[in-house]
Image (spheres, rainbow, N blue to C red):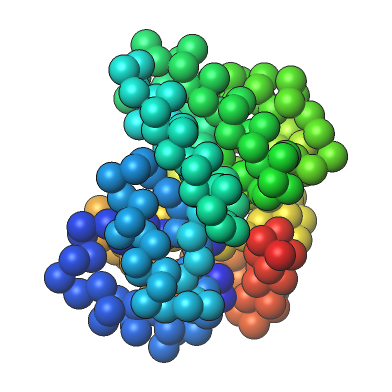
Amino acid sequence: MIDTHTHLYSEEFDEDRNEMIERALKKGVSKFYLPAINSETHEKMLNLEAEFPGQIISMMGLHPCYVKSENWEEELEVVYRYLNLRKFAAIGEIGIDLYWDKTTLDVQVKAFEQQIDWAIEKDLPIVIHTRESFAETFEVLNRKKHPKLRGIFHCFSGTLEQAKQAIDLNFLLGIGGVVTFKNGKIDQFLGEIPVHKIVLETDSPYLAPVPHRGKRNESSYLDLVVGKLVNIYNKDFSEIDRITTENAEKLFA
C-alpha cells in the first residue's frame, strides 16, 4: 500500500514517530508521500525524508490555509527556490480553502495559479486541497488546462458529479478515512468510479477511519480504508492494494 498523503512531520507524532512508521511498514505500507504546508515545516519534512530514503518522499508547495495577505508572495518564493534546488514528487498541497477564511480567496487563487504554472513548467503532478471550494477550484483548473496538468484531489469528499469532473480534468481521487464515515457519503457512489482512478491516503494525523474516528490518524490505518474499498468494489484486498499502488506509482513516476 502507498499512503499518498500523510503529515508525518506533524508535532502530533513527535512522541512516537518511528514506532508509528514501523507499525505502518508492518501492515504493508511501502511508501509515504508528505505534502508541504509552509516554510515553518519544510526542514522537518525534508529531514524525515532523509532519515527514510526511498520510503518517505516529499512534495513542495504552499497550503491554501497559509496563503495570508501579508506574506504569501514571500512564501511562494521559498517554494520556487526549493523546486529549483532538487526534485520533488509533486507540488502540493495547494488549492483553495473557503472553510476557514473566505476573505483571502483572491490571493488563494493567485497562489494556486502560480503553483500550477510551476507544476507545468517542472512537469510535476499537483495535489489539491479543496474545502467548500469545488466550484472555485474547477474554475481555476479549467482556465489552466494543459496536457501536463494532472494530480490528485486529496481527501476527496465531493459528489459523484464532482468526482467525474475531477477525473475528466486528468485527476485521481485521494480516498481516505472519510469513505468509512456513516455521513461521509462518498461510499454511496464510489463504486461508479473506476478503481484505477483512485489512490489511497490517510491525511494523518487527521481524519482517522472508523473505528478510530475522532482520534489521531496514522498510516497503519490504511488497511481499514482498503477494507472498505473491498466491499465497495467487490474485489479482494490484494487487488485493491495492487491497483491503487500502480496508480500512485504511475502518477508520481
Please name the residue shown 71% across and 65% down the image: 253
- Image quarter (top left, top right, bottom left or bottom right) of the N terminus: bottom right
Report the side of 44 relative to 14 (left or right): right
- Residue at image x 73%, y 48%? 123
Left or right: 212 as drawn, with respect to 57: left
Which residue is at the front of the view, 137 or 222?
A: 137
Q: In front here: 123 or 189?
A: 123
Residue 190 x/y as whole percent: 65, 51
Instruction: Residue 155 in the image: state x and y as whole percent.
Output: 50, 47
Which is nearer the eye, 181 or 247?
Answer: 247
Q: Is residue 91 above or below residue 111?
A: below
Does 70 sit left or right of 11 as displayed? right
Q: Residue furthest right?
A: 147
Residue 98 found in image quarter = top left
Q: Nearer the viewer, residue 181 or 9?
A: 9
Q: Position of residue 218 (x, y in %)?
A: 34, 67
Q: Quadrant of residue 100?
A: top left
Left or right of 234: which side holds 83? left
Residue for point 81% across, 34% down: 146
Rendering coords of residue 151 (x, y %) = 67, 47
